[in-house]
Image (cartoon, grey):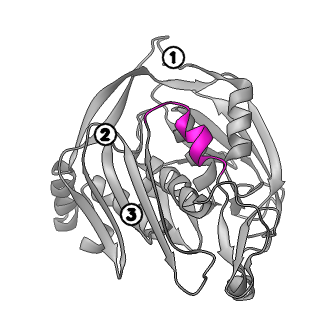
Amino acid sequence: MTLRGAAVEAFKSSAPISWRSTGKLQQTIGGCIEKTGRTLHSGKQSTVRIWPESAGKGRYFDFSSLLIPASIDFAEESPLCTTLRKNGHSVRTVEHLLSALEGTGVDNCRIEIINSDNGDPSVEVPIFDGSASEWLEAIEQVGLTVAMDSNGKNRDKLAPYLTQPVHVSKGDSIIAAFPSKQISISYGINFPQVPALSLQWFSSVFSTDSFYSKQIAPSRTFCIYEEVEKMRSAGLIKGGSLENAVVFSTSKGLMNPPLRSPEEPCRHKILDFIGDVSLFARNGSQGVPVANIISYKGGHALHAEFVRQLSGVSRTMF
């Protein structure tokens, strides 16, 4: 083992997590889900099929027969979304789908990505209306069922409980988490150049199974109108529109009212956070840690670094 490898293993062994039973059994979906829609960044049509999977298999993507686990081990930094990459192939904008799966308790599933352009090694998950609502509705239509392993047995679902404080930061952006008996998330944003958006917070305690579906999933992604052309010049949000994002202007305010809730932008940040932190899940476990979590001005890159801290391995350390 190399010196770096030994250091990584040492950090893994000191990870601030205790895995405990949730008192629930691992689940999967009751039937196949197929959804087609336009993607946010490439602007292309994309088809996703979600299949039931055995207990212990977890969530993973199947792209051109290449299996890419929904794991932080395969996450790479990319602008304005979360991307998973393996062997030169990538799946982009996975956060809303993974958020819906984590939030509804789909612990095991195979996510097939249909590539309309066989020569393209990169695919993207559809954006729909910019929230997780369409994924949620599709999951509710097929329902959930207890997942069985290859021996026909069910498996206990575990959750990661935080045992000591953890924090990551970059500039004035920060995520801090503290041991707790329940999952609570407080998320703050601050856009002083946009009076209609400005500074706001939303705090949530995940006390019921329906909390995610009612309070978080309907919240849409948002952007600032004056930054749109810059993002498109960078090859991003080619499929973006007033139908799949909440758009704020520095001078004109909210351009496509009404909001679905007063704190919709903050709630969407929590939606993204759940999807990104679901990458901590392994073998059908829960990804989001049982902790009191506070985030201010976070984003996908900081979410990923937080997950690496939970694993005991921070990318910035090496």
Horizontal and vertical percent position of residue 4: 21, 67
Amino acid type of the residue tagged 3 in the rendering: Ser
Q: Quadrant of residue 65?
A: top right
Q: Quadrant of the C terminus?
A: bottom left
Q: Is residue 121 above or below residue 210?
A: below
Which numbered mark, 2 or 3, is in the foreground of this view?
A: 3
Residue 318 in sight: no
- Tell which of 311 and 86 is nearer to you: 311
Check contact, mark 1 vs mark 2: CB within 8 A.
Answer: no
Under circle 1, the secondary element is loop
| Mark 2–mark 3 distance (CA, rounded to whole Å) | 19 Å
Judging by the rendered image, the residue that carries numbered circle 2 is 160
Under circle 3, the secondary element is strand
Judging by the rendered image, the residue that carries numbered circle 1 is 148
Horizontal and vertical percent position of residue 132: 66, 48
Neighbours of disc 2 within 10 Å: few (<14), some (14-19), many (20+): many
Disc number for residue 295: 3
